[in-house]
Amino acid sequence: NQCWSEDMATAWLRCGRNLLKFRTANSLLSWRLFGRFGVITPVAHREAARWALQYYYTVNRSALTKPSYLQWRHFRMSALSRSDTVIVVETPAFAESIADGDIKWDKAVGDAVAEDEQVGEIETDKTTIPVNAPSAGVVVELLVEDGEKVTPGTKLCKIQVGEVAAVKPVEQPSRAPEASPQPEVLKDGPVPTEPPPFPAQIPPLPTGPMATITPTPLPSPQTGRSPSVESVKAARTESRAKMSRMRLRIAERLKGAQNELAMLTTFNEIDMSKVIEMRKQHGEEFAKKHGLKLGFMSPFVKAAVFALQDQPIVNAVIEGNEIVYRDYYDISIAVASPKGLVVPVLRDCDAMTLADVEKSIFELGVKARDGTLAVEDMDGGTFTISNGGVFGSMFGTPIINPPQSAILGMHATMERPVAVNGKVEIRPMMYVALTYDHRLIDGREAVTFLKKIKKAVEDPRVVLLDL
């Protein structure tokens, strides 16, 4: 049970590399073991001490008695095992635009965690950053309270490393259930053989007219009701919950957009017959080749890029006293996630095909649903598309996503009677809305932009022919 201290094991690990290289075959086996634990870990300390002690003690006993070497220390071998190692988990690094966040714990003290399992998450203004366990073990201490603000490098919790079962709270022995009072049992007695006697005097029957007889009121059905039932039904409660940082940030940005921008909305309607026909005709072949269904978003993204190229002022933005014209087309897609509205960005949409757009939207949607969107996925964006039609919205006025200058709102597709070449026909129609910053975009440019989108969606050949 004698072993070197950790410093001694480290020293022997350094010296043993030169010694064990040039010894016998048995020594070479030891050298390979040292090479395996090239990084000095608690396991490496233990193994290095044991092998160095066995080897060097047989080679040179006198070296152990020299005063220049470190002194012996008595301790158990299990003291350096992984099961007794405690790791301190710190806050991971944030993006440059994020300064702090609120911690939310998924595990409690005593819970067992696997390697890379999520222990908690840090909710920031823009995204949620997971906190994973660096190794399997048990959470022994939470250094930060749930909901507390943390910054990069903050010590969050301690994990005891090792395959240890979760520490469950000791259950107090439950008391034996008290015996419920039994209903009274009638005692046995003689069964009566004759009916009870009639009363000596029978009240006389009324002799007056029936109209003058006042009926005896029946007891109200409410009289027998317990007052506790009425109080429970009359109870009206309310609860309070802290707003998440993301929800606070969304509220701040939307209210800021209302206060700063001169927002105006224009409307139009689009005949979706050609797009629906294209999906029916080529949808199955598209899905076989690309592994995804052809949706409505990709035609609208390509139509928006087509319209932005025709009206570059919609793709511009005001910065101070200047107008910044952007010659790239990064389309933001509003996505409803379990924790709030997020707006991931599709980069360089002018170079994308319909399949590329569908794949990118699907990947970003999965990230939004799982809460794994990074800040880089939402930074930037020159124009936003919001599809409220997936929830059945018929009509709405979207709010601009600053610092952008316009946003397109899509809505549900419904069959309606419309006039086509002087005839009334039933067509699948969609209302669309364009909200724009009137400080920068005039009504003519906004209406022209929306008509360009209508034209491109109703006849996709317009985009191919650049008409």
Image (spheres, rainbow, N blue to C red):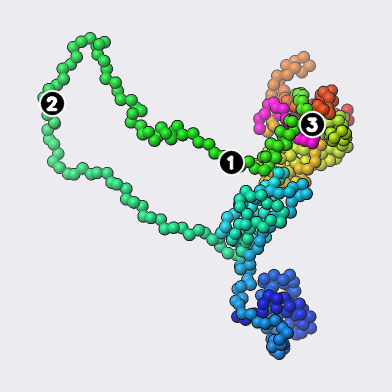
Between marks 1 and 2 in the image, the one whose residue lies nearer the viewer: 1
How far apart marks 3 and 2 lie (CA) works out to: 94 Å
How far apart marks 1 and 3 lie (CA) works out to: 33 Å
Badge 1 vs badge 2, beta-carbon distance below 8 Å = no
Question: Going by the picture, which residue comes out furthest to the bottom?
Answer: 62
Q: Is residue 386 visible?
A: no
Between marks 1 and 3 in the image, the one whose residue lies nearer the viewer: 1
In the rendered image, which quarter is residue 297 located in? top right
Drawn side of residue 466 relative to residue 129, left or right? right
Badge 3 vs badge 2, beta-carbon distance below 8 Å = no
- Numbered range of the magenta stretch: 391-411
In the rendered image, which quarter is residue 175 located in? bottom left
Mark 3 or mark 2: whose residue is earlier in sequence: 2
Residue depicted at 56% across the width and 62% down the height: 165
Badge 1 vs badge 3, beta-carbon distance below 8 Å = no
Dot 3 alpha-carbon crowd within 10 angstroms: few under 14, some 14 to 19, many 20 or more: many
Dot 1 alpha-carbon crowd within 10 angstroms: few under 14, some 14 to 19, many 20 or more: few
Q: Say which residue label 1 marks.
A: 241
Magenta residues, dominant SS class: loop
**Residue 290 place in picture, x, y as percent:** 77, 43
Quadrant occupied by the C terminus: top right
Type of amino acid under label 1: Ala
Q: Say which residue label 3 marks.
A: 406
**Residue 169 place in picture, x, y as percent:** 50, 58
Q: Say which residue label 2 marks.
A: 199
Q: Is residue 112 above or below residue 187?
A: below
Residue depicted at 69% across the width and 24% down the height: 415
Q: Is residue 392 visible?
A: yes
Mark 1 or mark 3: whose residue is earlier in sequence: 1
As rendered, which of 462 and 76 lies closer to the eye? 76
Mark 1 or mark 2: whose residue is earlier in sequence: 2
Quadrant occupied by the N terminus: bottom right
